[in-house]
Amino acid sequence: MTSLGAIALFGSLLGSCTPNTPETKPSASASPTASSAAKTPDTKSVATSPDASPKSDARIIKVKIDGLEPYKHPSGLFQIDVPKGWKPQENKKPNEVIVLWFDPSKNALLSVDVFKAPTETTTEQLTLLLQTFLKSTFGSRAGFSAEKPIQQKDGSVQIVWSYDESIKNITAKVQGNSFISRNGDKISLITTGGVADQIPALKESFDRVVNSYKVDPTIAIPATP
């Protein structure tokens, strides 16, 4: 069995989501926004690919999640339940906190990105910010696609995305679910990802993970790493 490492590559691609300039409200002709999408139930739900065929290479190690355990950022900024055995890796950036977790095979990932929100951030601006981030991060990957944004009843926005990864003559479709939300003066971006045809087996755990996230609005984001 082989570790594809496609999600490890995702971790190396993951950059800052902090906007370089203040966001402006998109016009009606802008990219599809969450406000035009159907709303989901009260809890977030990780989407699975209805079209994961052809099946990924049998040599790719299957990810298993054996329960969750609580994680609290050392600063107290946020807490979230994470898969047992997944070790946090912090990507330090000024005015932004990014923490990533990989499964031991590097074939699945969880990431949390928290940064200060621009003033008066609308749902449309959150959507545009997430769309821009995904396109700039993965837009050049083979087979990249991002589905229509879905507005959650809790105010967050979900986008399901995917791309094709080939490593050592093994090819697989990588699929991710990204959720962006505003909590007080902070914006949070939570992403789960893995080999597309393995996501159905991970969905229940990933759903619990994304719904366990809490941010403390009283904790300031460190200005310097």
Image: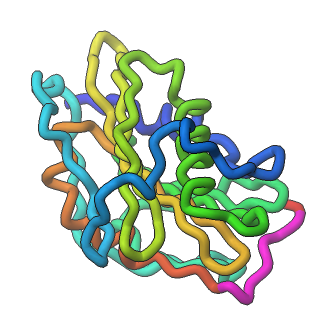
From this viewpoint, which residue is outermost toward the front? Answer: 28
Identify the residue shown where x is 42% and y is 38%.
7
Image quarter where the N terminus lies is top left
**Nearer to us in this view, 103 or 77:** 77
Q: Position of residue 106 (x, y in %)?
A: 39, 41
Identify the residue shown where x is 20% and y is 47%.
48
Identify the residue shown where x is 61% and y is 77%.
183
* Residue 133 seen anywhere in this rendered image of the structure: yes
Q: Position of residue 158 (x, y in %)?
A: 40, 55
Residue 49: in magenta span = no
* Residue 206 seen anywhere in this rendered image of the structure: no
Q: How is the image coloured?
A: rainbow
Residue 222: in magenta span = yes
Counting the numbered discs, the total is 0
Q: Position of residue 108 (x, y in %)?
A: 35, 46
From this viewpoint, which residue is outermost toward the right? Answer: 224
Quarter occupied by residue 74: bottom right
From this viewpoint, which residue is outermost toward the top? Answer: 169
- Left or right, 211 with respect to 182, comes to left
Identify the residue shown where x is 27% and y is 66%.
40
- Left or right, 92 with respect to 144, comes to right
Classified by dominant secondary structure, the portion drawn in magenta counts as loop
Quarter occupied by residue 182: bottom right
- Above or below 114: residue 92: above
Image quarter where the C terminus lies is bottom right
Quarter occupied by residue 144: top left
Q: Position of residue 34 (x, y in %)?
A: 44, 54
| Image: magenta residue range | 217-223
